[in-house]
Amino acid sequence: MGKVTVITSGKGGTGKSTVTAGLGAALVRRGNRVLTIDCDAGMRGIDLMLGVSGELVFDIADIVNGNCSPASAIYPCRTVPELYILPAPQNVRDEISPYIMRQLVRVLEKYYDHILIDCPAGIGSGFESAAAAASQAVMVANAEPLSLRGCDKVRQKLKQWHIPEIRLIINRFNERKFRKLDAFPDLDVVIDKAGARLLGIVPEDPAAAGAAQRGEPIEGKMKAVYAFDRIAARLDGVSVPLEL
Ligand SMILES: Nc1ncnc2c1ncn2[C@@H]1O[C@H](COP(=O)(O)OP(=O)(O)O)[C@@H](O)[C@H]1O
Ligand SMILES: [Mg+2]
């Protein structure tokens, strides 16, 4: 049975979609078959990051409405074999309900080693649908007060969905900027404020972010790739020491 992980944050723009794409590719490098599900109805982005936006015909709402089979709405990433994407609908009004999402993911999880569900910003209905289907959660935060406030809200919501395992990824970390911001004495305080066990730290990496924006694979000698590989190993239950 696949592990279903919701990638969430509360505050927008912390890097959920970039992390979903980067982590998806890293899990594939470990030999996994991975499905990413975009739950950001109206603002989908994973298709772009996986380089398939030009070929989309169906999306998740088409499956639910009986317009197509599940397989017809799942697209293989062209550059990373064994990485797949189920796109979100283009209109928010086509967003699917938490109950339906859960049923759909139960069917799909048999065919994948991992399912990563990319959340919209906030804790509205899109978040609820994404969380309802998940067995574990990753909160993506930046080491900034506003972002950590978002974690607080998300954590409470995730508990309402009885998600037992909530982990933290600190994304876009840059030591110099962190010192300059001077909001926290060290990363321990950031982790405490987020209120979840650390899964990993992804550095600020314009090369990886640029690749994602252009629909190119997040791989090779990029700084973020090293971090994604270590996080992927942890998601697979391998013990990899944290580098704080
Ligand atoms: N590790 C990173 N290093 C540099 N830029 C990043 C990183 N992660 C995300 N970004 C950038 O931050 C912005 C928001 O990322 P995105 O993944 O779209 O966030 P979200 O899905 O949470 O809204 C984008 O411009 C993206 O390229
Ligand atoms: Mg996003």
Image (spheres, rainbow, N blue to C red):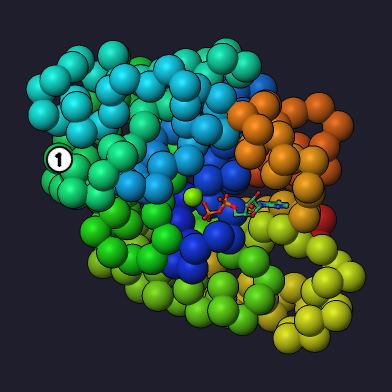
Residue depicted at 20% across the width and 33% down the height: 61
Q: Quadrant of residue 173?
A: bottom right
Q: Residue at left 28%, top 64%?
A: 124
Q: Is residue 234 left or right of residue 104?
A: right
Looking at the image, the residue that sits furthest to the front is 54
Q: Would you identify the image quadrant in which residue 1 lies?
A: top left
Give the amino acid at mark 1. Answer: Ile
Q: Residue lying furthest right in this view?
A: 176
Which residue is the site of mark 1?
100
Q: Give residue 30's position: percent from left, percent from top.
A: 64, 23
Q: Is the residue marked 1 within 8 Å of ligand 2, measured from its CB? A: no
**Image quadrant where one finds the C terminus:** bottom right
Tag 1: Cα neighbours inside 10 Å, few (<14), some, or many (≥20)? some
Question: Considering depth in this image, is 146 or 190 the residue closer to the camera?
Answer: 146
- The residue furthest left is 66
Question: From where the camera sits, is residue 40 visible?
Answer: yes
